[in-house]
Image: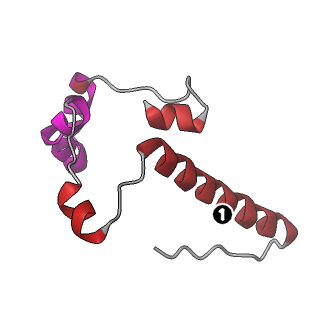
Amino acid sequence: MQLVLALSYPDSIKALPKLVIQGLGLFDANMREFVEMFYQYTEPQIVVSREFEQPFGWSATPLNVALRATLNWYRQRYISAESNRLANPNFKVHHTL
C-alpha cells in the first residue's frame, strides 16, 4: 500500500487473486514458485533490526522514506536517459546493477 501511495497512482496497481496466480503456475515455473511464496505478501513480515542497530549505531530507514528516495532516483535516471535519447537517436542506455 505504501508503494501505491508513493507512486501517486492509486488506480494503476491492481492485485491478481491467488486463484489466477495458481492458474498461471500451471504454465510458468516462476508463477508456480510465486504461489509457494504467496504467504509473504499476505502475512505481516516482522523485521527486527535491533541486533544490527546496537553495535553499529545505525537505524533502519522508514519504508516511506526509502520508497520515495528510490522512486525519485529511478525517475531522475529515466528522465535523464529519455532526454539523451531524444537529443541523440544513436544514444544507448547501459544499465549497470
Q: Residue furthest right?
A: 87
Q: Position of residue 63 (x, y in %)?
A: 42, 45
Q: Residue at x 55, y 28 (%)?
A: 12
Q: 34 and 44: which one is in front? A: 44
Q: Position of residue 74 (x, y in %)?
A: 60, 57
Which quadrant holds residue 7?
top right
Q: Where's residue 21, x and y in %?
A: 25, 32
Tell me, yes or no, whether the highlighted magenta stretch contains residue 36: yes
Q: Quadrant of residue 88?
A: bottom right
Q: Which residue is at the front of the view, 71 or 36?
A: 71
Q: Eyeballing the image, is 18 above or below 95?
A: above
Q: Relative to residue 1, is residue 69 drawn left or right?
A: right
Query: Residue flagged by tag 1: what amino acid is it?
Result: Arg
Secondary structure predominantly adopted by residues drawn in magenta:
helix
- What are the residue bounds of the magenta stretch? 19-42
Question: Label 1's element?
Answer: helix
When asked about the image quadrant of residue 37, the answer is top left
What number of labels is visible?
A: 1
What is the x, y in percent for residue 14? 44, 26
Q: Which residue is mark 1?
A: 77
Q: Is residue 6 above or below residue 54?
A: above
